[in-house]
Amino acid sequence: MPQDQQHASWKLEGGGQIMDLETAVKDGILGGRGGGGGLLPGKDATLVPVAEKPNLRNMIEELYSEVEDAPSVFICPISLEPMVDPVTLITGQTYERANILKWFSMGHLTCPTTMQELWDDAVTPNRTLCQLINAWFSQRYLQMKKRSENVQGRATELIQTLKKAKGQARVQALKELHKIVVAHAPVNTSVVDFAGVTLLSSLLGPFTSHAVGSEVIAIIVNLTLDSDTKANLMQPAKISLVVDLLNEGTIDTKINCTRLIEMLMWEKSFRSEVGPSLSLLVALLRLVKDKRHPNGVAAGLSLLKDIGSHEQVRSLMVSIGAVPQLAELLSNPKWELKFIEPALQILDDLSTIPDGLLALKDCHQIIPTAVRLLMHASEACTHHALSILWAVCKLALNECAFLAVEAGLAAKLLLVLQSGCNPEMKQRAAELLKLCSHNYSLTVIISKCKLTRTMQ
């Protein structure tokens, strides 16, 4: 996008052209895609002095979403970022001062854009372009601030409306507030400051409709909650509604419910009150099973992993069929790492209890799947797969070791031993290889270690 910025021209809507920056500044027509003129005029139609405007660098940082709409002449050809202190070389090319001086300090005596040799490395401040950049970003900065004030005012109005609105009017107010909170992050603080969180929390209860509950939860998960608010949300009637919505809501509602429970997860009173809930675990397994919605699968696995870290919940997870369902999920080679790691970690946690270990041994998919995932995706996956294989093989050596070796375990264990994995994993791999080799002669076990076939 390099060009001679001192002699650039811009087309007008009527078909004419502005031949230089001075004219662009005077007429106030240079702007990005948003249109509407590029200057911030004062009362006398002149540029607002730089001293009256916020720091340019700070404005650019706050307007990061609009930087890509900035006119190309504002962009430094070296950094591809808007210029704050533009300077021009003898070639007519303009750069950010710090960038071009760094270029010169590296021993270059050429123009980075044209690669022309420079007989003079002097740089001249491009004050006209600097004014124009300041004006363009100042205008958009003030527009952004005005929009933000308007949005915050509207959010406050909606909070007041929710205090008395009923039925469909309440749902519509919640929908609008939800859109505002998602689209405008600064509004989140306003909602909290104006006791909006307390009001929203009060709308959740045993008689709350699913339409209202879904919207309230969608808003709450985008807010920063303090301990008192979390404690209020953990009331049995509110948690019961969240679990109901997790079972019966839309996919977006289900994901929001998992996010809310995760937000509450590590509060002291949460574990004993919600963790062992059969309805919650069933809902999460249903979410994980629904492969039409990968985001839902990821959300369900994440929460199951957190809940499964508590021993008192693991037996309940095994009793509702978590092992075969997670094994089926892992048997799909197309799943990404974000699905594989939590699923393996859950199964690894379940292998620490007797009924979980028996369920793993009886699940015919577990051993070949765990062998395949050794040295497959990440060190964490290898750790969990190795731990699962060790546990089931130690439980039923003759039955499970045979299946594991036939699935290529010996070769995979050699890969672990030769890898950069931590010493503990290598020690476990060596012990498992020794354990599985008891049922084979040395010649047979060596034949099972053909790495070429394993890698294929």
Image (cartoon, rainbow, N blue to C red):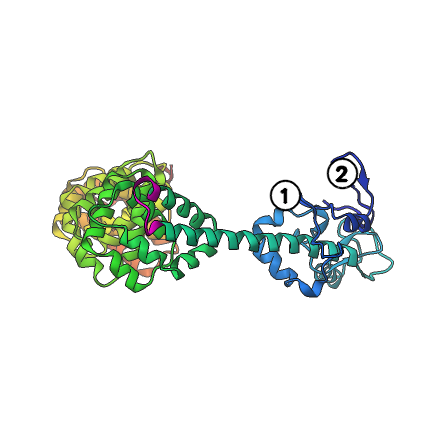
Q: Is residue 150 left or right of residue 305?
A: right
Q: Residues within 10 Å of mark 2 (few under 14, many from 20)?
A: few
Please report the residue visible at 56 percent of the width from the left and 54 percent of the height from the top: 146
Seen from the viewer's position, the closer of residues 196 and 110 is 196
Q: Is residue 126 above or below residue 285?
A: below
Q: Is residue 321 above or below residue 74?
A: above
| Total labels drawn | 2
Residue 311's disc is none
Of the residues shown, which amino acid type is indicated by label 2?
Answer: Leu
Whether residue 354 sits left or right of residue 9 in the image: it is: left
How far across and down, in percent of the image, does residue 144 sit?
Answer: 57, 53
Give the magenta part as a residue range.
162-170
Q: Residue at x 38, y 53 (%)?
A: 160
Relative image position of residue 179 (x, y in whole percent) = 43, 45
Whether label 2 touches label 1, CB < 8 Å = no
Alpha carbon separation for disc pair 2 and 1:
15 Å
Can you give x and y, in whole percent of width and height, for residue 447 in the image? 29, 40
Quadrant into which the C terminus falls: top left
**Residue shown at 73% from the left, 46% from the top:** 30
- The residue indicated by pointer 2 is 12
Q: Is residue 167 inside the magenta stretch?
A: yes
Note whether residue 70 is visible: yes
Tell me the quadrant of the picture where the N terminus can be found. top right
User: Extreme bottom residue here?
Assistant: 51
- In the shown orientation, is residue 47 left or right of residue 286? right
- Using the image as rendered, state which of residue 446 and residue 373 is in the foreground: 373
Q: Quadrant for residue 427, please give it.
A: bottom left
Q: Secondary structure at mark 2?
A: loop
Q: Amino acid at mark 1?
A: Gly
Task: Kindly identify which residue carries mark 1.
Answer: 34
Which SS class for mark 1?
A: loop
Residue 448 image-quadrant placement: top left
